[in-house]
Image: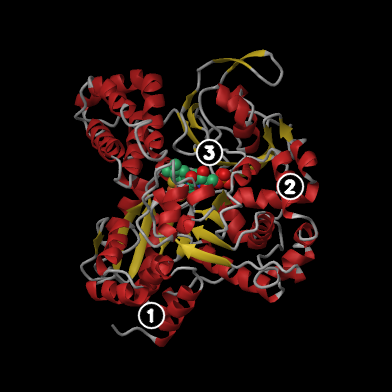
Amino acid sequence: MDLSEQTLEKIEKTIAKFPKKRSAMLPILHLIQEEKGYLDPEAEEWVAAKLEVTPIQVREVVTFYPMYRQKPIGKVHVKVCRTLSCALVGAYKVCEKLEEELKCKRGETSADGKYTIEFVECIADCGKGPVVQVDDKMYELIKPEKAGELAEEIKRMAEAGPEAVATAQPGTPGFKG
Amino acid sequence: MIQKLPVQERRIVYKHVDEEGYTNDIECYLKNGGYEVMKKAYQAQPEDLRQEVLNSGLKGRGGAGFPTGMKWKFVDHKSGKPIYLICNADESEPGTFKDRQLIYQDPHQLIEGMMISAFANNCAQAFIYIRGEFINGARILENAIEEARAKNFLGDDVLGSGYSCEITVCRGAGAYICGEETGLIESLEGKRGYPRVKPPYFPAVLGLYQCPTIVNNVETLCQVKHVIDMGGDEFAKIGVKGDSGTHIWGVSGHVQRPGYYEIEAGACTFGDLLHDFCGGPLPGRQFKALIPGGSSTKVLKWGEKFKVKHPNDGQEYEWGVEDIPLDAISIGLCGTFLGTGGSIVMDDSTDMLEALANLNAFYGHESCGQCTPCREGSLWLEKLSGRMTSGKARPEDVPLLKDIADQVAGRTICAHGEAVAWPVQSAVPKFQDEYLDKISKQASGQRYNPAGYPLI
Ligand SMILES: Cc1cc2nc3c(=O)[nH]c(=O)nc-3n(C[C@H](O)[C@H](O)[C@H](O)COP(=O)(O)O)c2cc1C
Ligand code: FES
């Protein structure tokens, strides 16, 4: 599997931080997913060899945790919190509005490959609900009336290059993600 | 006109949260007296520090409220194996958003608290297990750790004491069950987050890599810094007998000013919190229900009366929801828990059956699947309440909900079983009249409580 120098270096550093190699499993899977977009059998085998475990021991982790994916997703990943605190202030309506605007159903990727919308469970920002996490950025107080505005911003993100979608900077609204 | 609040916040761990000009870098922390408590602590003997924490009466802030000093006392120091400290930064109990502010806004307070706790318990290494969704939170912590290392507040021979300790950050990947301490430990070992059977796997004896391990919540570890700063006996004077210190109340849902408020234990009531701090109900609305301390704690209903005899003063009281003092003892007397202090407020626009279905969907999604009663029970509850809210409810479904829940609690490896059962067990007797009324009107095809947002 070809991984960038940067990712490989991060992986080595991560492994060195734990008393046992296998403990680096979750962080390494995140690193690979961040570069590749998803975790395929090749990635599982690569991680297994790296951490000296069997491929099935990697797969059982990949399939247990909701954040790992075995299939690619859209360019912009939209996660709408659906749990009670957010639902009480309109999260379900927000999700419907985003689905409409982005022409993409929850749990699916839009036909043009630009968006994936997901319903997720509480992301620990309940006092500012409804909250929507877009890639690594957090959007708070997204009342149903404001969902259209957010959809426009998401569309801009999909148009822009990957740089524009990358890390949120301190001081920007999204930094809490 | 500025209205004077009858009760003020008492900010200890939240002292700098949302403070104008306060930043999360080490320079700002040092300017505000950061790491001074740690320097003092490293002059003391570890067992004396542990005694201070025991004297303080500090209880864990992760939900279960176990006394921290006691937890530390159980640690096996004789095995000869390394001892590990884990900070539980999974913050995944619905309605809870208090650790987030500490991690994002004041990461060095957490590191200082952890380095004091690690030194006090002779820990060989410390970990922060942070939920996967806190992507920037993990970056902030990593960065803060490097800053602290550069100043020798962690790493080798910390502050010339001869004691060495690293802090390693590990990001989870979206599983609620990894907040349960033994599920967390399995996850940190690179496995599925399946909670372990206790006994024998009590973390204090057989934790991470089968070594003695302490798992403490983010806020608990931040509080430790202040315990050592004030001294255990002084800290114990804050709050009430049996519940010392402050609690962070994170209020969400149907109030005018949702948010977080750090309040001395027992200093005010739910009524004060919801009206004075949170501005009361939304215009034209009335409060109907309150989940006091995270979604797993038992729901309270406006209009209920709690007749209690308080152990602290021997007096008898009759409280409504708004009269309950905000301390673990008083809340416990009313049949529920302080939990994480994440209070979810529902007003009269809420369809209570949909609210229950919403939580059942959460627990159905989050059961790890190890224990049959929890795996099957949580899914049955999710499906049953999902069907009931889609216009196909039968009156006999109402007792059936409780029947299923009754068979989950107490029959599982970890407390997720109780987390599944308690919302249902508490809500069904209190709101069954509303459920039955909704069922009798479902044929109309209209939403039962059209003023509220859909919850499922
Ligand atoms: C299903 C479940 C989820 C939990 N989630 C969390 C969590 O997200 N954060 C946390 O600190 N404790 C959580 N706990 C409690 C932990 O098991 C443990 O009691 C706590 O981390 C101990 O720290 P403390 O003594 O400082 O409170 C959870 C428990 C259960 C049963
Ligand atoms: S319920 Fe949405 S962030 Fe907690």
Could you say whether the residue bearing mark 1 is in a helix, strand or loop?
A: loop
- CB at disc 3 and ligand 1 closer than 8 Å: yes
- Asked whether the beta carbons under mark 1 and mark 2 sit within 8 Å of each other, the answer is no
> What is the distance, in whole Å, between disc 1 and disc 3 at their CAs?
46 Å
Asked if marks 2 and 3 fall on the same chain, the answer is yes
Front-lying residue, B157 or B292:
B157
Q: Nearer the viewer, mark 1 or mark 3?
A: 3
Residue B277 visible in the current orientation: yes
Rendered view: A13 above or below B141? below
Asked if marks 1 and 3 fall on the same chain, the answer is no
Residue A135 visible in the current orientation: no
Query: Horizontal and vertical percent for residue A156?
Result: 38, 71
Residue A161: which numbered mark, if any? Answer: 1
Residue B227: which numbered mark, if any? Answer: 2
Tell me the residue at 59%/42% (across/down).
Answer: B60
What amino acid is found at the position of numbered circle 1 in the picture? Gly
What amino acid is found at the position of numbered circle 2 in the picture? Val
- Most extreme residue toward the bottom is A5
Q: Is residue B159 left or right of residue B322?
A: right
- CB at disc 1 and ligand 2 closer than 8 Å: no
What amino acid is found at the position of numbered circle 3 in the picture? Ala
Asked if marks 1 and 2 fall on the same chain, the answer is no
Rendered view: A168 above or below A139? below
Circle 1 marks a residue in which chain? A
Query: Horizontal and vertical percent for residue B222?
Result: 66, 52
Residue B64: which numbered mark, if any? Answer: 3
Circle 3 marks a residue in which chain? B
